[in-house]
Amino acid sequence: MKKVRGLCSILVLLFALTPSLGADKKPKLLVALAVDQFRYDYLTRFRPAYHSGIARLLENGAVFTDARYIHFPTVTAVGHSTFMSGATPSVSGIVGNEWFDRSRNRAVTSVSDETTLRLGGVPNAKGSSPNRLLVSTVSDELKMAGKSRKVIGISIKDRSSILPAGHMADAAYWFDNDSNHFVSSTYYMKELPPWVSKINQDGPIRKYLGATWSAVDGKPGEKPFCSMTAGTELRFCGSIEATPFGNELLEEFAEKAIENESLGTHDGTDVLALSLSANDYIGHAVGPDAPEVRDISIRTDLLIGKLLDFIDSRIGSGNTLVVFTADHGVAPVPEVN
């Protein structure tokens, strides 16, 4: 039992300071980065292949190698709510991704909220909010203390963008697979900002149509994992969430958010809560030992490096505090066992 627990217990693994950010210097930007289903052993198993963002965090940050969950279940909503609040399910109220609500006599999700509407995507769809979260997050405390101006949450999943950002976030954005648009909720605003509408009008996934997913360090002639075009000899990748392209969408969106919301340029410490979700969709499909998991882990390293370089170019090196973690792990799929 202890062995299984060790595989899944990865909530707080690594806190990393970008170089030259001293203990007495307040960061201009806090990047709270969760990679969905990124098991701790991915840091060590694939370490020789990391040369960018994860490598930078491991080499320059403080690494917690024996951080463990003290709660159950270890699922996405619970991990993301605990990450920035420190509260376990019995305190936070987030006891799962979804549960049966006796007062409503039906199932609800961790962020469903019938009093709100979704902005963007399918018209008149119900929105989401952090109302079921019973505690404050780090972002909320910074806001209440007057030490943060802007807080933005971003993910493919609504719960992963909403719960870490907290109650007082200026916005939470997630990706709606039905419309292939980034969406939000009237909990945060009356309408999407022009820069988000522009991204949706341009078609976020358009450039990935017909793309193939191949190993980033694959040998010449090596067969790709899948294709974004159906009807070819290659396996169809399915939705973009189940490919590294889903994480690329999020990183590009995060860059636009930093730029258009001027994150890191205000008085106090702005917060960007970013959750990369594609790792989770892939891991559930193929398990932790498949070559696809190694590949997306390497690509995650490259993507984090790209984001950190962009942030440094905007607000200067040494002005960002990065917290890197995962919400849960994964066991081998039954077919492998």
Image (cartoon, rainbow, N blue to C red):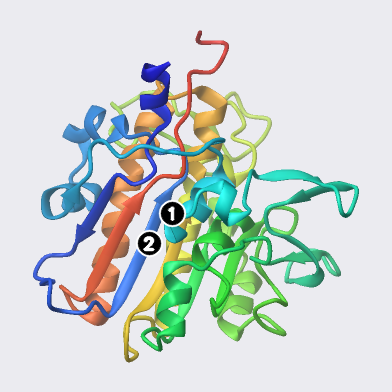
* Residue kind at label 1, given as amino acid type: Phe
* Residue kind at label 2, given as amino acid type: Ala
Front-most of residues 179 and 67: 67
Q: Earlier in the sequence, mark 2 or mark 1?
A: 2
Secondary element at image label 2: strand
79 sits left or right of 48 in the view: right
Marks 2 and 1, how far apart at CA: 9 Å
Q: Residue 308 placed where, x, y %? A: 27, 64
Q: Residue at coordinates 23% horizontally, 43% vertically from top-left?
A: 64
Q: Residue 295 placed where, x, y %? A: 36, 34
In the depicted structure, whether residue 280 falls above or below residue 276: above
Closer to viewer: mark 2 or mark 1 = 1
Front-most of residues 52 and 70: 70
Q: Residues within 10 Å of mark 1 (few under 14, many from 20)?
A: many
259 sits left or right of 301 in the view: right
In the depicted structure, whether residue 142 falls above or below residue 325: below
Image-quadrant location for residue 47: top left
Can you identify the residue that label 1 sits on? 83
Q: Residue at coordinates 91% horizontally, 48% vertically from top-left?
A: 105
In the depicted structure, whether residue 233 falls above or below residue 236: above
Can you identify the residue that label 2 sits on? 32
Total numbered badges shown on the rendered structure: 2
Labels 2 & 1 near each other (Cβ < 8 A): yes
12 sits left or right of 48 in the view: right
Q: Quadrant of the N terminus?
A: top left
Q: Residue at coordinates 50% horizontally, 61% vertically from top-left?
A: 164
Q: Residue 65 placed where, x, y %? A: 23, 37
123 sits left or right of 332 in the view: right
Q: Residue at coordinates 35% horizontally, 30% vertically from top-left?
A: 294
For the question of whether residue 303 can be seen, the reply is: yes
Q: Residue furthest front?
A: 91
Q: Residues within 10 Å of mark 2 (few under 14, many from 20)?
A: many
